[in-house]
Amino acid sequence: MDKIVIEGGIPLQGEVASSGAKNAALPILAATLLAPGIHHLSNVPNLADIRTAKKLLANLGVKFTDHEVLAVDTSRLTSCEAPYALVKTMRAAVLVLGPLVARAGEARVSLPGGCAIGARPINLHLKGLEEMGVRVTLKHGYVEAKVHRLHGAPIHLELPSVTGTENLMMAATLAAGTTVIHNAAQEPEVADLARFLVAMGAEIDGIGTDVLTIRGVQSLSPASHTIMPDRIEAATYLTAAAITQGEVTIRGVPCEHLTAVLDKFQEAGVRLAIEDSQLKVKPAKHLVGVDVMTHPYPGFPTDMQAQFMALMCIAEGASLITENIFEKRFMHVSELRRLGADIVVSGNHALVRGVRCLQGAPVMATDLRASASLVLAGLAAQGVTEVHRVYHLDRGYEQLEHKLSALGARIWRAKAD
Ligand code: UD1
C-alpha cells in the first residue's frame, strides 16, 4: 500500500486548477442510465470513485469510450444489480437505485451500511421511492425495489439529503405526473445533475432551491454535459496556500459556491482576491482562530471541516468547530494531535487552540477529507510527515501530490513498509 511523504515548511507558490467535481460526476454518471443511447461527458475527474462508478455501470451493461470526452453507452442494460463488493467501497453507488427503477421498473442494490464518518442510512431515499409507488423490501442485505410505473408524489425530506434528493429527482423525471421535493438539498452538485437531466429532456423547476418540481416525461434522450469544477478541491488548495503562508492562484474555482468558506478564510485573516473563476490567495498577516459550524449548503460544508481544522491548528487563539452533519466526523483529531495540535472534542464540538508550529509524524487517515487535512497539516509541519492509507485521497483528489509539487511542495508517494 502507498503512503504520501511530505517535508513540510515550504510556502506554496504558483497556479493550480480545479478538476471536475466528484460529487457532480457520480450522480451524472448514474443519470445516464435513464436514457438509452450514447451520452458525452466532459471534465470527468480521474479518481478512484469514478473508476468504481464505471465498474458499477459496466456491471449493468453500460459501455464506455474514454477519450478527452467520456462516451457512455447505455443502450442496453443487462442487469439491475449493484453488488455489495462495489457499494461497500463507495456509498454513492446507491445513486443507481432511482435511475434503475425508473428505467427498468426494478433494482437490487446492496445496503451501504455504516462508514467511518457515521451511520449514514438511506431511509429517506427509500421512503421517497415508496411514496412514488415503489415496493421496497430488504432481503439478505439488499434493497429490492419494484414498480410497474412510478407516479409523481409530494415528498417532504426530513433532512436535505444530497444523494437522497438526487435519487428521487432522477426517479421522478420518468414518473407519471408531478413530483414536488420539499426540503431538497441545494448543493451546487444537485443543480449540476438537474441541468444534465434537463439537457436529457426532463422538466424540472426550482433548480438550486429547496423545492424541486419535476413533471415526469415519457422518455429521455442521451445528452452532452460538462461536469462543474470541484469546489471542495479548490477550497482544499486554498487551505494549502493559507496553511503554508503561500501565494497561490487557483483557477477554475466556482467562487459563487464557496461564499461561506471564503468568508471564514477572510475572517481568519487570509487575504483573498476573487476574480470570476479565479482565486488569488495571499498569506494572512495574523492568522486568527475563528468558529465554524457545518450546515447543508449554502452553509459551511462538512466536506471542508477537516481541512479548515488543520488551518486552525496553527492560528492565533482558539477556534470552536461544530460538526452538524455527520456524527463521527472528527476522526482526524487524534491524528492531528500526533502532529502537535491542541484539540479537545466534546460531542459534536472540537475546540482547537492554535499552536506555534506542528511537527511531522507518521499518521493514518480514515476517510477522504480527514486524509486531506493530514496532508495539509503535513505541508505546514516541521520535518517529515507520512500519511498512510492513501487510497482515501485517491478516491477524491486528482493528482494531489503532482498538483502540490507543482506549487513547490516537497511531497511524494512511496511504498509503505
Ligand atoms: C453527500 C456527499 C458527501 C457530503 C454529504 C453532506 C456525494 C456523493 N456525497 O453525501 O461528500 O459529505 O453529502 O454534504 O454527493 N441521512 C439520513 N437518511 C438518509 C440520508 C441521509 O438520516 O436517507 C442523514 C445522514 O446520515 C447525514 C445527513 O442526512 O447525517 C446528510 O447526509 P447526505 O446529505 O445524505 O449525505 P450523502 O448524500 O451520503
Image (cartoon, rainbow, N blue to C red):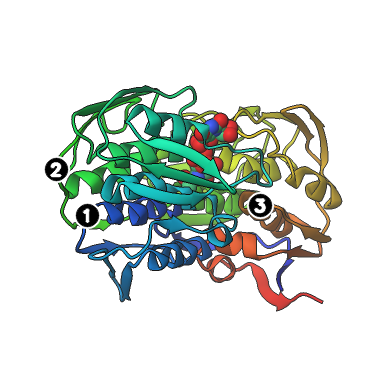
The amino acid pointed to by label 2 is Gln
In depth, the one of 340 and 27 nearer the eye is 27
Q: Amino acid at mark 1?
A: Ala
Q: Is residue 376 shown to the viewer in this render?
A: yes
* Residue ID at (54%, 61%): 86
Whether the residue carrying mark 1 lies under 8 Å from ligand 1 is answered with: no
State which mark lies toward you, 3 or 2: 2
What residue would you read off at disc 3? 367
Of badges 2 and 1, the one in the foreground is 2
Q: What residue is rendered at 50% in x and 48% in y?
A: 232
Residue 342 occupies quadrant:
top right
Task: Decide which of 274, 50 is in the foreground and name it.
Answer: 50
Please rate how many residues cluster around mark 3, counting C-alpha atoms within 10 Å: few if below 14, some from 14 to 19, many from 20. Answer: many
> Can residue 279 be spotted in the picture?
no
- Residue of label 2: 218
Q: CA distance from mark 2 to mark 1?
A: 11 Å
Q: In screen coordinates, is 285 left or right of 152?
A: right
Question: Which of the two labelled residues, at mark 2 and mark 1, occupies the earlier sequence position?
Answer: 1
Calculate the distance from the C-alpha at mark 3 to the C-alpha at mark 2.
Answer: 41 Å
